[in-house]
Image (spheres, helix red, strand yellow):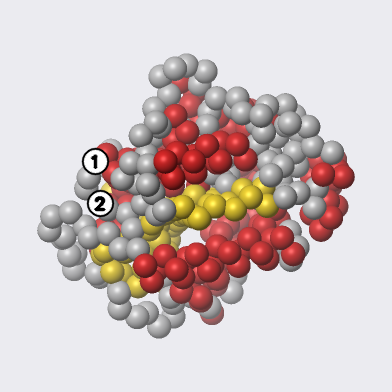
Amino acid sequence: MKISDAMIDRQLRRTGMLIRRFSAPPTERRLRRLTRLVDTVVPLARIGVSRTMRVREVGIDRADGTRLRVLIYSPRTLAANATGVLWLHGGGYFLGRPEQDVAVYRQMVRNTGCVIIAPDYRRSVEEPYPAALDDGYTALIWLRDNAIRLGINPDQLAIAGESAGGGLTAALTLLARDRAEVNIAFQMPIYPMIDDRVCTESARDSDAPLLDTATLIGAWQLYLRDLHGTQGVPIYAAPARATDLRGLPPTFTYVGDLEPFRDETIAYVDGLRACGVPVDFEIYPGCWHGFDRLVPRARVSRQAMSSRERWLRHAIATYFAAQPGERQELA
């Protein structure tokens, strides 16, 4: 889907044009270079965080004996029975760190009192699928087992994220449903990256700002490696391939109508609704991928973030999921 400048929302147009102007072909070498650049800049997001939230860092043992770094963001004064949100950062599965979403954490913590668990999952430049998914699930089980100690209601665990983080959100809710070891109260996969086939109308031949077809294909190749282009891609790698969405938790998502993920998000939402899953979904005209994060003062960005906050408040008041069996409380 070719995108002209005139199709872009007026308040997003200038930024979109600048992104297009300075974009380069997404070779694997350039994607890896971008990853290193982001790793250099992201630590700056720590500045001033401790004045608005309590931040802790813990290490969780992986099955192979290595440690998964996890950041915990919570209110300065923690109330009992808070909602626990496992947050997965975006970055096409190949870049990013949990610190990059501090602005989102600050708003969520301030407005709802939730506690956010943000794992520094392995990216595809380090290890391909299923490393990121395994890390997400490890963090989810740790959240379940430590909920009470963290001041979290064990019956209100949620998963959320944007872009690739939205894709991991959808994948983890599928995995949690199928393993039946932890129950999810609700999920927020925002403009999720869920279809490796890149075959929808919105994904084909896209030259949209920030995320175009070439970049999308390159990101999927890095994430899937030998699985890319085969029929053997699991639903936990590309949730758009799942045909049975029964039993998934209530869902909120939105997407811009000019980005590659538009049609796969619509199909995912339709599949959820067909299976009786409560869904709140919005499409924002004239918007490219990540519009709300890169141009947060635009009217449409404020609208999207307001809608997200409103639904989160509704979900916290409405959706609960008791955990299966007995819960282990760690000292």
Residue count near mark 2 (Cα–Cα under 10 Å), binned few <14, some 14–19, many ≥20? many
- The residue that label 1 is drawn on is 179
Q: Would residue 32 be found to the left or right of residue 18 on screen?
A: left
Residue count near mark 1 (Cα–Cα under 10 Å), binned few <14, some 14–19, many ≥20? few
Report the front residue among 235 and 127.
235
Question: Can you name the residue that lies furthest to the left here?
Answer: 326
User: Is residue 158 something that shows in the picture?
Assistant: yes
Vertical relation: 229 (above or below) 244: above
Report the front residue among 167 and 119.
167
Q: Residue at x 37, y 79 (%)?
A: 78
Q: Residue at x 25, y 51 (%)?
A: 182
- The residue that label 2 is drawn on is 182
Amino acid beneath label 1: Arg
Q: Residue at x 36, y 52 (%)?
A: 249
Percent of width and height locating residue 88: 47, 51
Instruction: Find out whether the residues at labels 2 and 1 contact each other: C-beta distance under 8 Å.
Output: yes
Percent of width and height locating residue 152: 31, 69
- Can you say which quadrant of the picture contains the N terminus? top right
- Can you say which quadrant of the picture contains the C terminus? bottom left
